[in-house]
Image (cartoon, rainbow, N blue to C red):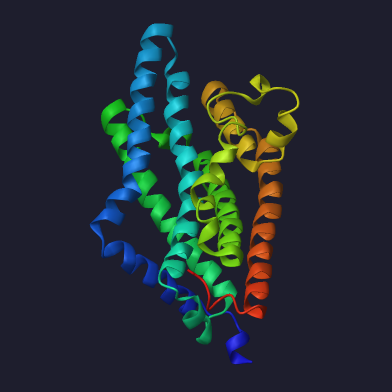
């Protein structure tokens, strides 16, 4: 009965395992900040050009940089979960892990914790460089920034758990999902433009995504100085459903894989 209880010590030990893998490779450390910084630089220079050419206000000029950095929170949080899980597939380690007292929910907690660390490191470095190069700080959004970050993190975790479930069930044949799954949301989340510009038949899909409400809320805050609580409530409700769905799919996939003996066959 003791091993059926959730243990934060076991979850933290798994998180440390993933951190040591990152810490032991300078390539992994560089990769964490490389893409967020590169995207921020490209869109930052584009912002300077558009500001000069179109006479944007300061608030409007900051929208692109904020959108890029917030998008990277969503992308990196999803990728952080999926890449950590892929480490176990590469090492063919799932069978050994679950011979130990480790519980599936403890593995989920470890994946989410290491994803949080990777995301904060990568996006944090890019945000600091945005202040240096473009004199723009995301902190100008104030307390609503914490809400935006948390909601995008949770959505990224939800998608990452679904991707991990597919990897668990179908092995490395589903590896491309780790890179492609969240990108599907890019054009329909209203990251760089309001949802009204999308075709009418696409908009219902957009309104089913918490990310759409986050980016709409970001624009409302930066352009109008107004934090829309209705948009925030919609994002909270949808994210509650998504994280429950992602966790449920992962646990169901784990149950099926254990029944069929797939944990020992991963990586083949």
Looking at the rendered image, the quarter that the N terminus falls into is: bottom right
Horizontally, is 136 left or right of 110 in the view?
left
Q: Quadrant of residue 199?
A: top right
**Res 147 visible:** no
Residue drawn at 57 percent across, 66 percent down: 168
Horizontally, is 86 left or right of 210 in the view?
left
Residue drawn at 44 percent across, 12 percent down: 56
In the rendered image, the vertical position of residue 223 relative to residue 30, given as above or below: above
Residue drawn at 38 percent across, 72 percent down: 17
Residue 226, given in percent of the width and then of the height, sits at 59, 28
Residue 177, given in percent of the width and then of the height, sits at 54, 51
Residue 74, given in percent of the width and then of the height, sits at 51, 45
Horizontally, is 213 left or right of 34 in the view?
right
Q: Nearer the viewer, residue 84 or 136?
A: 84
Residue 42, given in percent of the width and then of the height, sits at 35, 27
**Res 266 visible:** yes
In the rendered image, the vertical position of residue 180 relative to residue 26, given as above or below: above
Residue drawn at 53 percent across, 79 percent down: 264
The residue most toward the bottom is 1
The residue most toward the front is 268
Q: Nearer the viewer, residue 221 or 93?
A: 93
The residue most toward the left is 26
- How many numbered tags mark residues here? 0
Q: Nearer the viewer, residue 181 or 208?
A: 181
């Amino acid at each position: 009965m003791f091993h059926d209880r959730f243990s934060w010590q076991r979850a933290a030990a798994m998180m440390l395992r993933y951190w040591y893998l990152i810490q032991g490779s300078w390539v992994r450390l560089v990769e964490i900040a490389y893409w967020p910084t590169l995207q921020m630089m490209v869109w930052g220079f584009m912002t300077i050009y558009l500001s000069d050419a179109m006479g944007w206000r300061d608030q409007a000029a900051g929208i692109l940089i904020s959108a890029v950095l917030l998008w990277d929170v969503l992308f990196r949080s999803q990728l952080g979960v999926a890449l950590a899980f892929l480490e176990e597939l590469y090492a063919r380690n799932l069978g050994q892990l679950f011979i130990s007292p480790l519980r599936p929910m403890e593995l989920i907690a470890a994946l989410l914790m290491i994803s949080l660390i990777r995301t904060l490191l990568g996006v944090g470095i890019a945000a600091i460089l945005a202040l240096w190069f473009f004199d723009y700080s995301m902190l100008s959004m104030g307390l609503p920034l914490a809400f935006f970050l948390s909601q995008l993190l949770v959505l990224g975790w939800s998608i990452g758990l679904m991707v991990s479930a597919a990897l668990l069930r179908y092995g490395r044949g589903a590896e491309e999902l780790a890179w492609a799954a969240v990108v599907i949301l890019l054009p329909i989340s209203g990251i760089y433009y309001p949802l009204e510009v999308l075709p009418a038949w696409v908009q219902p899909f957009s309104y089913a995504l918490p990310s759409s409400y986050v980016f709409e809320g970001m624009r409302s805050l930066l352009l109008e100085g107004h934090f829309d609580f209705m948009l925030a409530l919609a994002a909270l409700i949808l994210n509650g459903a998504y994280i429950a769905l992602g966790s449920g799919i992962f646990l169901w996939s784990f149950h099926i894989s254990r029944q069929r003996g797939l944990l020992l066959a991963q990586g083949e």
